[in-house]
Amino acid sequence: MTKRGGQASTKPPSGTRDFLPDDVLRRRYVVGVVESVYEQYGFAPIETPAFENLSTLLGKYGEEGDKLLFRLLLRGEALREALGAAEGEVGQADLADLGLRYDLTVPLARVVAQYSALPRFFKRYQIQPVWRADRPGRGRYREFYQCDVDIVGTDSLTAEAEVCAAVVQVLERLGFSELSLRINHRGLLRGMIGRAGIDEAMEQSALVALDKLDKLGADGVTRELAERGVSERAARTLLDLTAGGEEGTGEGSADKLAHLESELSSDPGASALRDVRELWDLLGATPAGKYARFSPELARGLSYYTGPIFEIGVEDLAGSLGGGGRYDELVGMFGKRAVPAVGCSLGLERILLVMHERGMYPPLSAGPQVMVCWFGVAPARALEIGHALRAQGLKVEVYPQQAKLGKQLQYADDPGVRAPLAAIVGEDELERGELTLKHLASGAQQRVALSRAGDLARDWLDSPPSAG
RNA sequence: GUGGGUGUAGCUCAGCUGGUAGAGCACCGGGUUGUGGCCCCGGUUGUCGCGGGUUCAAGUCCCGUCAUCCACCCCA
């Protein structure tokens, strides 16, 4: 909504952000780590359009997801026709044909269905923004970046193990140490729901309630299930199935697995359970093993998952840092052959949020290394000095206008500039082909020939001089 | 979409039971015409989120609205 009087708000739309230089620096640092780890695992980058045909997006994410899609209004004549032709009701389905992508998995599935010459096992990563017409909150935006890794073309559980290991290593390299990687299986959830005698129509609703076990505890979930129309008896059966071990520990996970294996030995859930067991063992051979936890209550919202699902998080964040799972039927939904696939996604802004709150960033800087401060000489001479220093490999800013020297030095040290060095150029220096290099933090300064300034600057940047 | 809190200077905020809008920091100028950070002096900064109502008088009370934050819902 714009203000009256033609004065538009200068804030970005709710749920979006502008990124100032320091923000961009931190984002690039994290993205750089993500890229380098993903590439170590042999994943190759792809990018896809910001918007897709609505038919590509609809029906892939479940009811809630469809609601949260940003739709693009028809344009020009098509819009007029749609509005005019309508005898009866005009619905939003008639007025939009495109939508902003909601995640990176569905576009990947489309790409796989479209191109037949992809490698037999297509390992790609994709780091791009997605959009959701959601209400913003802590760590939650309407425009945010996802960092996806996927392996397409195999139903082997080694693929699950690899994507989980990759995201875990990204987080480890960023400095995270107490992670939890929760794993579960869609088939197992279906099996447990069936075993508890809960109607299939209520499966989705029951799963949402079950997923809150961490937050609400067994009693809370029972209450929530009751509100959703699940009998107390069924709720108890469901909760009993997920129980069977201490929370959070590797021992507990093993106990829960064993408990379920004995309970479901002849159920449809049994084969899912064998997958979980196998994946559990495979994860033990990767860096993800020490964080893995079997969480039979984990549900995850997206409806396209068919097999193992996982979610990675830290204590002090209510939501997750990332998650994923197997989606063997998604590519087939585009009307071509079915292709098995599994992937995992990290939420960039969630990672940044936690890193910010914990002060986990290394020192980062862009901006100039040297500020050329000049007075009593022609501006053209200042520019020449600046270029000479750049030619010596330095990042150089030339103070843009006439000013007192003190003012220029102060500006060089401004929090928004933070040039560590100043190159002072007055008539004296100019005549002798020299400049005065000053280290701002220590106050140390030295007259030096212009041709040697780069070397001295690098010395000082590497090991700051002591005050003098 | 539901419930609650908060909107006053660039930033953080004060402003009592209504009586002509404040502080700190930041910023600008000077003390210091070739040396910043410390200090001193001076200065600028506002449709008090927006619209309406009550009143002699509204930053203050009432209604609406928008924005934002928190919780729920859902999620990366």
Image (cartoon, coloured by chain):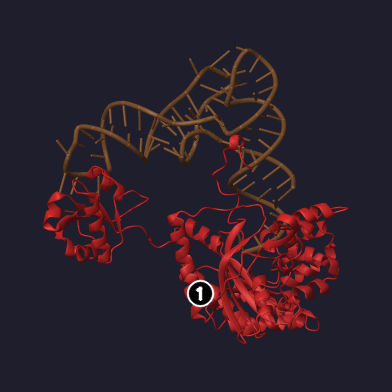
Chain colours: A red, B brown
Q: Nearer the viewer, residue A233 or A410?
A: A410
Horizontal side of A275 relative to A415 (left or right) equals right
Residue A198 at least partly seen:
no
Looking at the image, residue B54 lies above or below residue A17: above
Location of residue B22 by image quarter = top left
Q: Residue at x 63, y 52 (%)?
A: A136
Q: State the residue at coordinates (62%, 41%).
A: A2
The one of A330 and A327 positioned closer to us in this rendering: A330
Percent across and percent down for residue A56 are 72, 69
Residue B29 locus on image (x, y percent): 28, 34
Q: Nearer the viewer, residue A100 or A77?
A: A77
Q: Residues within 10 Å of mark 1 (few under 14, many from 20)?
A: many
Instruction: Give x and y (percent) for residue B45.
Output: 44, 31
Q: Secondary structure at mark 1?
A: helix
- Residue at 44% in and 58% down: A359
Residue wearing tag 1: A169
Quadrant placement of the N terminus of chain A: top right
Q: Is residue A84 rendered to the left or right of residue A169?
A: right
The kind of residue on which mark 1 rests is Gln
Left or right: A427 with respect to B43?
Answer: left
Number of marks present in the image shown: 1
Q: Is residue A94 visible?
A: yes
Find residue A431 and report its image quarter: bottom left
> What is the chain letter for disc 1?
A
